[in-house]
Amino acid sequence: MERTAAFGHRAAPKTLPGASENGDLASLRQELEDALASEIKKNEVAVTVGADGLVVSLREIGFFDSGSAKIRETSLSAFSRIAWLLAERPDRVRIEGHTDNKPIHNAQFSDNWDLSTSRATELVRLLIVKYEFAPERLSAAGYAEYHPVNSNDNPEARAQNRRVDVVILGRTSMKRAAPSAGVAQSEASPTTPTAVLTRPKPSPAIPETSPPLR
């Protein structure tokens, strides 16, 4: 399992990244909104534009029991609609797990990092095993409470933060960039999806050191 250091909030642009290259994502957004109209109406799903592409947010209230990484049987139909719309497309997909800021500790998960990563990895595994997605198209990331879409000041706002985001990456975001300092990057192997556990960067007061090259 790859572990990557990353932290911070991502601003959502008003248009899809690389719009000239990714006009088809606009039509995909409409298809997803039509297919998930019932879940959107019940506030179980939201389809938005994010910094990296199209984002389908699967909120915990509709897809997971509290403290569990296993998708509910009653939600498999909605997830299947998403999978079938994405199955024949070439876009890469990143599955991101998110939580609210309430600490968790149970027999399965030691903290919110563990829960958010496990939920993301579970959906990646489902896409590969059940829907036969090519593993190299997929990656999983866990962000715990550090990428909220709302405040954590009341139950309704916290509920929006407990989610798994299916991010359909635009071509612009798919181009390989030089790694930032302190950030490890790699592609998913043909047999194992990449799992990314994101954690806050160390305090600037603590210098980061690297072993000498051999």
Image (tube, rainbow, N blue to C red):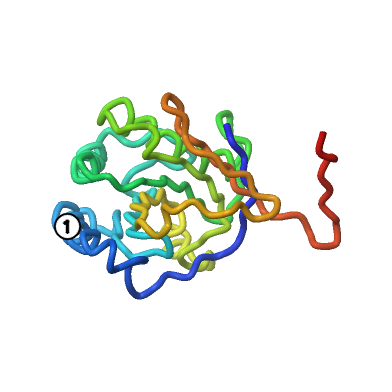
| Residue 81 located left or right of residue 165 | left
User: At 46% across and 61% down in the image, what residue appears?
Assistant: 155
**Mark 1: secondary structure:** helix
Q: Residues within 10 Å of mark 1 (few under 14, many from 20)?
A: some
Give percent across and percent down for residue 100.
52, 55
Q: Quadrant of the N terminus?
A: top right
Q: Position of residue 205 (x, y in %)?
A: 85, 62
Q: Nearer the viewer, residue 187 or 192?
A: 187
- In this view, the residue farthest toward the bottom is 14
Residue furthest out toward the front? 214
Query: Is 134 rendered above or below residue 153?
Result: above
Q: Amino acid at mark 1?
A: Ala
- Residue 64: image quadrant is top left
Number of residue marks: 1
- Mark 1 highlights which residue? 37
Figure quadrant of residue 121: top left
* Vertical relation: 75 (above or below) 101: above
Q: Is residue 89 left or right of residue 71?
A: left
Where 67 sits versus 17, above or below? Answer: above
Quadrant showing the C terminus: top right
Instruction: Judge left or right: residue 42 versus residue 183.
Output: left
Q: Nearer the viewer, residue 130 or 182?
A: 182
21 or 142: nearer the eye? Answer: 21
Q: Residue at x 31, y 48 (%)?
A: 91
Closer to us: 14 or 40: 14
| Residue depicted at 45% across the width and 39% down the height | 119
Give the residue at x 57% y 38%: 114
Q: Position of residue 44 (x, y in %)?
A: 29, 54
Above or below, 209 against 128 in this view is below
Inspect this view and state whether residue 145 appears: yes
Q: Is residue 41 in view?
A: no
Location of residue 187 in the rendering, given as x and y in whole percent from the top left corner: 49, 38
